[in-house]
Amino acid sequence: MPVTVCIFEDNKAFRGSLEELFSFSDDFVVTGSFDSYQHASGEVRNSNPDVILMDIDMPGISGIEAVKQIRDFNKKVAIIMLTVFDDNKHVLDAIFAGASGYLLKKHVAERLITAIREVLNGGAPMSPAIAKMVLQSMQPPQGEPLDYHFTSREKDILQLLCKGNSYKMIAAETGLSFETIRSYIKHIYEKLQVHSATEAVSKAIKERLI
């Protein structure tokens, strides 16, 4: 079955380009395309899409606030933020609100389809510059990081996950099978007491685990 996508983007031209991009593939179906979340919040409940593309800077309700509202009733849907912003505040606010990935609009043409496939496979896609900035910008908290008793392999995999790699990419990087990586990440989730790649990445960054 095709992947269902819902778009929230206030720039009409850019929104149209996203719709056109998906129209070239039978693998995707756009269930809704809106210029704001404020007047289309019920669409997410009604259509229950696989993926939401969310502009961060929209009139009325911002993309970050929209993510928070969606997460109140839907914890599973993949939400990828599309934005021109690459500053710390917007990135981290989006991640901690519950965004699944974060791409700069200038990277959409070459990265969006891959990012959607990554996020549906459990990854947390980010533009390379964004991933690097997130990892480097966090100030270490006071005191020593908590010990979750990760093995050296689990630490390596968690670090790769925090860089925005999908399960498939981590498997290629480590030389392990896809199912082995899935098993390792399941154990990482259990140790961190989280349920998704986004939560794992957020906690790893916040607690300086990598």
Image: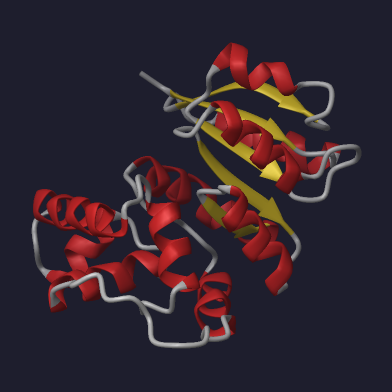
Residue 123: percent from the left, percent from the top?
Answer: 37, 53
Residue 70: percent from the left, percent from the top?
Answer: 62, 32
- 180 or 69, nearer to the observer: 69
Q: Is residue 41 left or right of residue 21?
A: right
* Count of picture labels: 0
Q: Is residue 155 above or below residue 141?
A: above
Residue 156 in which image quadrant: bottom left
Residue 137 visible at all: yes
Q: Is residue 25 above or below residue 80?
A: above
Please name the residue shown 53% across and 56% down the image. 110
Q: Outermost residue, right direction?
A: 59
Position of the C terminus by quadrant: bottom left
Residue 105: percent from the left, percent from the top?
Answer: 69, 56
Q: Outermost residue, front direction?
A: 143
Residue 89: percent from the left, percent from the top?
Answer: 72, 68
Residue 30 in which image quadrant: top right
Q: Is residue 199 left or right of residue 6?
A: left
Residue 86 visible at all: no
Position of the N terminus by quadrant: top left
Please name the residue shown 38% across and 53% down the image. 197
Q: Outermost residue, top direction?
A: 46
Please name the residue shown 32% across and 44% down the image. 121
